[in-house]
Image (spheres, grey):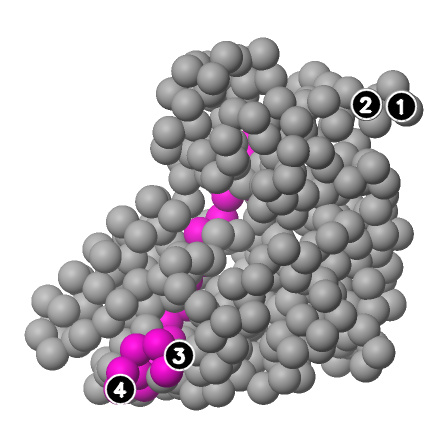
Amino acid sequence: MVGSSLIKTLAKEIGFSDCGTAQADRLTEEEYPLDAWLAEGCNAEMAYMERNRGMRRDPRLLVEGARSVISLVLAYKPDRLMEGHYKIAQYAYGEDYHERLKRMMYQLIAAIKERHPDFEARPFVDTAPISDRHWAARAGLGWIGRNNLFIHPLHGTYCFLGEIVTTSEIDNYDQPLAAKPTVTDIVEDPGRIPEPHHHPTAASSLCGDCMLCVNACPNHAIVSLKNGTYVVDARRCTSYNTIENRSPELPDHLDTRGYIFGCDICQLVCPYNKDVPPSFLLTDDRKQELESLATADEQTFRKMVKHSPINRIKHPQLLRNINKASCNKASC
């Protein structure tokens, strides 16, 4: 059995912003309304979301003998934003988070194995049918907001997430949050992992009656299912369309508000992001590079995005997105 406090101490030393643990079992439909979301067609052309539904809910089907899930948070809020008409989602300002988190998680696995040689585990960062957000919520690290983004009490929605699924038991599993944090619940030093793991205990519930993200979305992509659960309809979402949509043309109705890769609108209005401290320094060189992306030729584009989340799209998609953003500006 591995100690929870040891895992969190090692995670902090490696550079993670937070860490929580949960017993590996099945996520309920209430926790993860996957079936209802799919039934409404909200997955758009992401047919892969219909496959491996069992694995998406139960990590024991993904890793044989799995007993525990270690959820990890790495904060990414930049110290400033891009300027100009064309915008890129803030999570894509720096290094590809898949590469960075995987590297850090392998470090954590190795560090645990030094103390527990029989520790066996697999790391995941968007690389398998397992839901990052829902396991982070199960591990008590935060909750899933009405905009379907994971919200951390200290770092808001500016969080990269990853999981380590292990066959080892952990001595003390964390519990999901039951209430929305208040000012007095937030620890004084936002740069450290609270020890022991600190969670809010306020009586009010989660996002409450706040509808800022719902109302701010220019495409009305945050919708309510019949059971009252809010989800994101990918068919209307700027982030989905500018990244996952492979069609030569974007939907006529789509208003990208200048975004050519991803979208930040729903998190820019979130009250929990108001006082989030920066965790990423956007250098002058990187800022200029990002702002020049819209005029880059294909060869330059490939070089610029090689180790960036932006490598998710090809140059023709970038040109398509730029054309859409320009069209929105001209109201064509």
Question: Does residue 236 appear left or right of residue 278 in this picture?
Answer: right
Q: Residues within 10 Å of mark 3 (few under 14, many from 20)?
A: many
Tell me if label 3 and label 1 are in contact, CB under 8 Å: no
Query: Quick one: label 1, few (<14), some, or many (20+) residues within 10 Å?
Result: few
| Element class at badge 4 | loop
Mark 4 vs mark 2: which is more N-terminal?
Answer: 4
Q: Which residue is mark 4?
A: 65
Which of disc 4 and disc 3 is earlier in sequence? 3
Task: Give the number of the mark in front: 4 or 2.
Answer: 2
Quadrant (top left, top right, bottom left, bottom right) of the N terminus = bottom left
204 or 72: which is nearer to us? 72
Q: Which residue is mark 1?
A: 332
Marked residue nearer the N-terminal end (1 or 2): 2
Q: What is the x, y in percent for residue 332?
A: 89, 23
Q: Quadrant of residue 110?
A: bottom left
Dots 4 and 2: beta carbons under 8 Å?
Answer: no
Q: Which residue is mark 3?
A: 59
Which residue corresponds to the image point at 75% horizontal and 27% vertical from the top-left? 324
- Magenta residues span 61-80
Q: Residues within 10 Å of mark 4 (few under 14, many from 20)?
A: some
Mark 2 closeness class: few <14, some 14–19, many ≥20 residues within 10 Å: some
Decide if residue 282 is on the left or right side of residue 7.
right
Question: What residue is shown at x 64% (from left), y 39% (from top)?
Answer: 247
Q: CA distance from mark 4 to mark 2?
A: 53 Å
Between marks 3 and 2 in the image, the one whose residue lies nearer the viewer:
2
Q: Is residue 68 magenta?
A: yes
Which residue is the site of mark 2? 327
How far apart are labels 3 and 1 at the CA level? 47 Å
Quadrant in which residue 35 is drawn: bottom right
First reached walking from the N terminus: tag 3 or tag 1: 3
Q: Earlier in the sequence, mark 4 or mark 1?
A: 4
Of labels 3 and 1, the one closer to you: 1
